[in-house]
Amino acid sequence: MTETPQSMIAGMGHAVPSKVLTNHDLEKMVDTNDQWIRERTGIERRHILEKDKTNSDLAKQAGVLALQDAGIKPEEVDCIILATISGDMPFPSTACFVQAKLGAVNAAAFDISAACSGFLYGLALADSFIRSKKFQRVLVIGSETLSRFTDWEDRATCVLFGDGAGAAVVVPSDGIKGIIASYIRSDGRLTHLLNTPGGGSAHPTSHDTVDQHMHFIKMEGREVFKHAVRSMVDAVKHSLKQAKLRPEEIDFLVPHQANVRIIDAIAERLHMGRDRVCINVQNYGNTSAASIPIALDEARRDGRIHEGSTCLLVAFGGGLTWASTIIRF
Ligand code: UT7
């Protein structure tokens, strides 16, 4: 373990839309059933953003709560890093919309695209900014409105995703608290397993791309599942090694919430019982970059994570990307 970690989380917040879509609601939309969805994924419901709202509205809500929790004013924020694959527009950065909505007038603001690993990529960047003394107060947000990019006629994907946002304020560490390990990786040879093919320079928007549903998320679920377990276990090994910790020294595991079977497989490899694992996929579905900050903030607020807890975060997503962070609270 590092004696003097360089950055720490000073405050967190999360937000989800009030509208809930249950498995039973989905039964009326596509050929699926509650039992299949629960057994194969663990998901029971997900939150869907109201029609008149955007990703940056959700991200702003989470950001406001995180800043309040940290006791930091919007104008004191130096940098906003927004992890998302479902922003307000192809450009400019959704982070810039959030900056304006927050009134964070003195910040640099930009998006990063690392799919479900995005929040941990953001934390790694924030940690580096703080270590290099480039910035002092970095707001990292994971915010997704995947419902806007979901093919509601495709039962293989539409049951999986949900909308939400989570945020953390990263500042210099005031002691042994903080980010004590951070590992990020990707494998661009596997982009075909999980992507949204239409709307970019590869397949610019046309009547044809729209007719072929190319603006929606496509996934080879079974293949992605295999890589998810393998890559997340790899990421955990690297971050534990960096922090010089053994799995039994981890108090709480906060994995990306895509599928309860993936979470159980990782926990089993680490010999961690469910009492030490954060699982909330049943309530939110897969919220991509937002899943870890939502789960982390919930566990902080209900006391499962407290002062002195050592938490292992691990994520996996399209790219493929994967990442792991260890934080001492
Ligand atoms: O967050 C980024 C990373 N993403 C992930 O980690 C997701 C990884 N993948 C998964 O979680 C799982 O692969 C899924 C939940 C997506 C799918 O579960 P699976 O156990 O791998 O199912 P499958 O795709 O192998 O499909 C099994 C069967 C198929 O029927 P046949 O061919 O066996 O007759 C599917 O057509 O289940 C059928 N099926 C469904 N049935 C009812 C697929 N989707 C549904 C559905 N309702 N919604």
Image (cartoon, grey):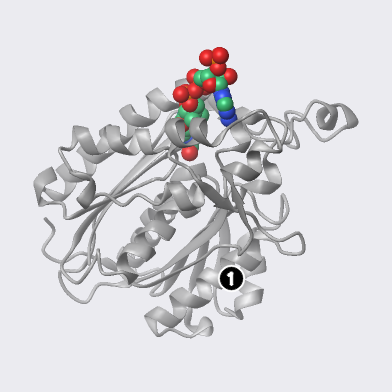
Spot the residue most to the right. Answer: 207
Q: Position of residue 302 (x, y in %)?
A: 31, 69
Quadrant of residue 272 within the rendered picture? top left
Query: Foreground: 114 or 257?
Result: 257
Q: Which residue shows up at 61% across the image and 81% down it? A: 103
Question: Which amino acid does the dot numbered 1 rest on?
Answer: Lys
- Quick check: is the Cβ at mark 1 less than 8 Å away from ligand 1? no
In percent of width and height, residue 5 lies at 20, 64
Graded by Cα atoms within 10 Å as few (under 14), some (14 to 19) or many (20 or more), the crowding at tag 1 reads many
| Left or right of 65 in this view: 94 | right
Residue 126, image quadrant:
bottom left
| Tag count | 1
Q: Is residue 9 something that shows in the picture?
A: no
The residue beneath circle 1 is 60
Residue 7 position within the rendered picture, expressed as x and y whole percent measured from the top left = 28, 67
Give the quarter of the figure containing the N terminus: bottom left
Q: Is residue 250 left or right of residue 206?
A: left
Q: Is residue 327 left or right of residue 78?
A: left
| The C terminus: image quadrant | bottom left
**Residue 138 higher or lower than 142, as above or below:** below
Tell me the element at label 1: helix
> Nearest the camera: 43 or 228?
43
Out of 139 and 276, give the one closest to the viewer: 276
Q: Residue 59, percent across and down? A: 57, 65
Q: Is residue 301 visible?
A: yes
Location of residue 124 with respect to 262 vertically, above or below: below
Residue drawn at the location 77% of the way across and 64% of the way down: 52
Is residue 86 shown above or below 40?
below
Q: Residue at x 16, y 50 (%)?
A: 243
